Image (tube, grey):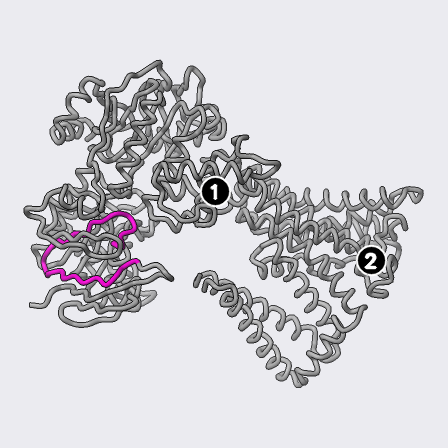
Amino acid sequence: MAAAVKIQNITRKFGTLTAVRNVSLTIEKGTVHAIVGENGAGKSTLTNIISGMLPPTGGELIIRGKPVRFTSPKDAAEEGIGMVHQHFMLAGELRVAENIMLGYEECRLFSPLNRKAVNNRIRECAEKYSLALNPDARVSNLSVGEAQRVEIMKLLLRNASIMILDEPTAVLTPMESTKLFTTLRTLAENGHTVLFISHKLDEVLSFADTISVMRKGEIVCTMPAAGATKEQLAGRMVERGVLLSVDNPPATPGAERLRVSNLCLADTRGAQKLRNLSLSIKAGEIYGIAGVEGNGQSELLQALSGMLQGQKGIKGSIQLEGRSLLELSPRQITDCGVGAVPQNRHTEAVITSFSVTDNLIFGRHREPSLHRGAGFSHKALQQLESRLIPDYGVLCQNPAKQQLGALSGGNQQKVVVAREMTRPDLKLLILAQPTRGVDIGAIETIHRKIIEARSRGVAILLISAELEELITLSTRIGCIYNGAISHEFTAKECELKRLEGVAFQKEIGLYIT
Amino acid sequence: MNHPLQRALVPTLSILLAILLNAAIISATGTDPLMVAERIVRSTLGSPYGTGQVLFKATTLLFSALAVAIPFHLRLFNIGAEGQLQVGAIAAAISAASLPPSLTPWAAIPLAVLAAMTAGAGWASIAAILKIRFRVNEVISTIMLNFIAQGVSGYLLFNHFALPSTAHSAPIAENARIASFSELYGWFPSSPANPSLYAAIALSLGFWALLYRTRHGFEMRASGLQPLAAKRAGINPARHTLLAMAMGGASAGLGAANLVLGYKGYYEAGMTAGAGFSGIATALLAAAHPLWIMGSALFMGLLDYGGLAVNSLVPKEIFQVMTAVTILLVISATALNRRNS
């Protein structure tokens, strides 16, 4: 039987850059195939070629034994290939069923939609592949995991037998991830072929049948997941040795820096998002917040960064060394010595069409040391970039000219982290998902820098969906559930349980669900 | 698409295409396109008077295009340059007519210009405030403000300031007139081109420097590109919205001063003649870049006056169609270029 997907000598160039170089790969029908690799290794480009988003510069694509040439995702869809993107393509105002029907209404324009039939098909499909979904829910009210299920369901009802998922678990909680992989496994057993990209070696090893490693636009090896090890994969992904978890010497916390007491917050619809949330962070310690997305983390971050200034429905207090932050604007808060790496890099932390250097000073552009007249001092900017770029291992040739958007996600994140961590007189650092969508090599750099900042005496608040990351870095861990800290692990507990690994993750899991 | 020559190829081709298309339109009306082209060139750049007329038109267009371009960098679409010109013009005319004749031109002109700028800036600020306080879309509010400006200036003119049985206000004091190049140095004889042109060029350069060389411009561009990120970075979006709209309105006021103090010498009904709307096209043609705008204002000024000059050969309406077709083609071409790069 012919393989589901066969790629022969595919190459894709962007200008002078070769994103994918002479890649050949065979993906068998009914398997779950994972592609791992660092940021910028060419994984997304390769999947975009298979799904018809990008035409290859050279080479051949063979689907079920038939050579094809896609000019658009539509062509690929006709061959039964569907893709779930990292950023979902759903209409938030519409209901689940409507989103699934969209573009596939199966009835003439202006004739009434056959809602009932669609709802039934959705229920059937949901049962068969354990994709729990309510067809009548509004998409804007869904969690990330549910929205992803809508995307998968869309593909299933469009008869996609080859499914491509770009970093499907980047935004999921560990539980949702497990659920997703159960679904993917059922799909494979029913004859579908699943291809997914991931950064997380653990999940790749436990859920995929076959693993391909990409590096610098080439596939360096393809192996069965059974028998492969994490070290082996990491070694093939990066040429140099990578520490999978950084050293975390014991912390020596100082005086209290941040105190949040009984913080309550209701959103505009009156729903209670934070309920008497209290926590305190000392100088020189990392306070980790573990939790499933949507339990108040975003609201806490907004309150801490001044984005809720002047808003009604806030009770309680936030104090930095005794000074109340709730009445302050974002600018006044940063002036107090607070740095922040926001959750969503693209919309909150950078200007992608600005140069790398401009992004290094973005938000710090009011610092007098960078000024000259009404503009910026070239010399000061050059000094800053020549200090930060090598120190944080940002890969870019010409920071003053190159657009930030041209860098890979990991390198963009390093720019943000470098900028925020090197603020003068930094007292409090707020890190939200600091390594989301970042490759192993970059994670190591960022983790090392976080520990360094802590040792310098900075108070750090770390919010992450990666329990492993939290356990590795945090001095203390608070579990957030339903808008409050439901349990706190003391420094002693964290130090001891860090050695337990998965067992500790499971224990935290109990408090956040 | 990285080589500058390559990048110039698409716009050049689109202009060629526009010329061919326009030639076809002219032929369709039964006139020889070559003769029309010759007449346009001869009557504009071919004579000192024509050149002067083109420069004068370009001056007003440059001011009104900057009125659109500055807010554009904050993703604000100022449709209201027309209204801002109108209130600026009436403010310039009334203030210049009521100045004491004994005042030196060095005081009288700046005072009248300041009145025009203030009026334009104030008018534009209304839209900014509506946006900041009540989240009214600036496109809607500036369109409405255009109607209001039209009504208010018409009412003021005909009920308070018009000279009996005319449609214009009292002539301004001699000391508030901006002398033309022709009167000053004998350049472009008898054309209304005047030193406001210097001010317009200086303003373009100034806006360029503001946008790309100052911290204020850094904040403006950031706010326009990614508003949420800018807010988190401590940039106050309301402040920038108000300032950009006010600067734009002031620029429109300067354009009005050029018309009143440098040319007409009074306020007349309909004197702005859509210069505010042409300003939108001029700004978009240059992708709102303050330096490119100088080129596009010159081009639009050329078409504007060239159209008048060939009025006997090509009906005004047909010439309007041709101008709009050209702008559409050039804008599509630049969009195409941007996508390919």
Give SS at disc 2. Answer: helix
Residue A188 image-quadrant placement: bottom left
Q: Where is residue A8 in the image (x, y as percent from the top left)?
A: 19, 66
Q: Nearer the viewer, residue A168 or B219?
A: B219
Q: Where is residue A433 in the image (x, y as percent from the top left)?
A: 30, 36
Q: Quadrant of the N terminus of chain A?
A: bottom left
Residue, disc 2: B264
Q: Nearer the viewer, residue B229 or A39?
A: A39
| Labels 2 and 1 touching (C-beta < 8 A) | no
Report the residue that reaches farthest toward the right. Answer: B102
Q: Looking at the picture, does residue A444 appear above or below residue B76? A: above
Q: Which amino acid does label 2 sit on?
A: Lys
- In the image, B284: left or right of A55? right
Query: Could you tell me which chain the residue with mark 2 belongs to?
Result: B
Residue, disc 1: A358
Q: Where is residue A118 in the image (x, y as percent from the top left)?
A: 21, 57
- Is residue A39 in the magenta section? yes
Residue at 61% in and 40% down: B243
Specify the segment rendered in magenta: A19-43
